[in-house]
Structure formats: structure tokens, C-alpha cells
Amino acid sequence: MDQITLVKDAIHRPDEPRHFMQFKYPDKHFVASYKGQTLAETSNALVLSEVGYGIYEPVIYFPVEDVKEEVLRKTAKSTHCPLKGDTEYFDLAGNGADEDADIAWRYAQPFDFAEKLIGYIAFDSRKVRIESDSK
């Protein structure tokens, strides 16, 4: 195997260390909204940066207590990430349009090394507007 230099303060996938992530807690206020409706608002976001098959855009995770969970409806969809674990997906409750499908997800039981994700929900930034400003 080629020599691999591990990234400091990153969580590396045990079976493939070139797949890794870093968590940050920025000093910013974030708002997630959909068609003018606020879905979540927090000053305690977790930002996940991940490198796998590519360098992915950072994902903003909102603490569950700062998400208006009544506007979300859990779906049957689930996906698996070999770095984070299995996801649960959410649609926008009360709507049936395709663009409202799978707008949010969470890792309810992530791998032990990704346990920082417990209690957080992320929104699909292609569907949900996520804005930030400094505190």
C-alpha cells in the first residue's frame, strides 16, 4: 500500500484512512429555510468537512433541539456511509412534491468514532437555503 499521511485532528475511516472527516463548531449563527419557512436556527451548529472519492462541500448540522421537527416527517429511506453510519431521511411534512422529498437526514446511530453526529440534523443545501452570519 502507498504511504498515507493522516490529516491531523481528522477522523479517518478504519479500513480506508484516505476517507476522513473533520468537525468544527463555528462562531456563527445559521438559519435553514425552505420557501421562506424557517426549518431550523442555531448558534451551535456542527460543520462536517469530508474527503472521500472527492472533496465534498462542508455540511452544516443543526442540533435537534434547534430544528422545528414538526415540519419534518421521517421516511423509509436510509443510506449507508462507511465513515459515518446509517442515515434516516425526512420529507417536509404536509407536502407531497418531489422537491420536498428527502430534504433532511440524520445519523441516529453513527459509528462510535462518528458519535459527535448524534443529536444533529442536516439539510440538503440544494433544496434548503442555509445562511449564516457571525454571532
Image (spheres, rainbow, N blue to C red):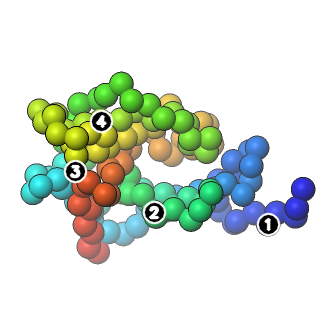
Mark yes or no: residue 71 visible: no
Say which label, 4 or 3, has the lower sequence index: 3
**Residue linked to disc 1:** 5
Residue type, mark 4 in image: Phe
Say which label, 1 or 2, has the lower sequence index: 1
Q: CA distance from mark 3 to mark 2?
A: 17 Å
Q: Residue at x 11, y 32 (%)?
A: 94
35, 112: nearer the viewer: 35
**Residue linked to disc 2:** 58
Label 3 or label 2, whichever lies nearer to me, is 2
Mark number for residue 40? 3
Q: Is residue 97 above or below residue 55?
A: above
Number of marks drawn: 4
Residue type, mark 1 in image: Thr
Is residue 17 found left or right of 49 in the rendered image? right
Q: Is residue 62 above or below residue 87?
A: below
Q: x, y (%) of residue 79?
A: 48, 35
Q: CA distance from mark 4 to mark 3?
A: 14 Å
**Residue linked to disc 4:** 90
Q: x, y (%) of residue 86?
A: 51, 33
Q: CA distance from mark 3 to mark 1?
A: 37 Å
Label 1 or label 4, whichever lies nearer to me, is 4
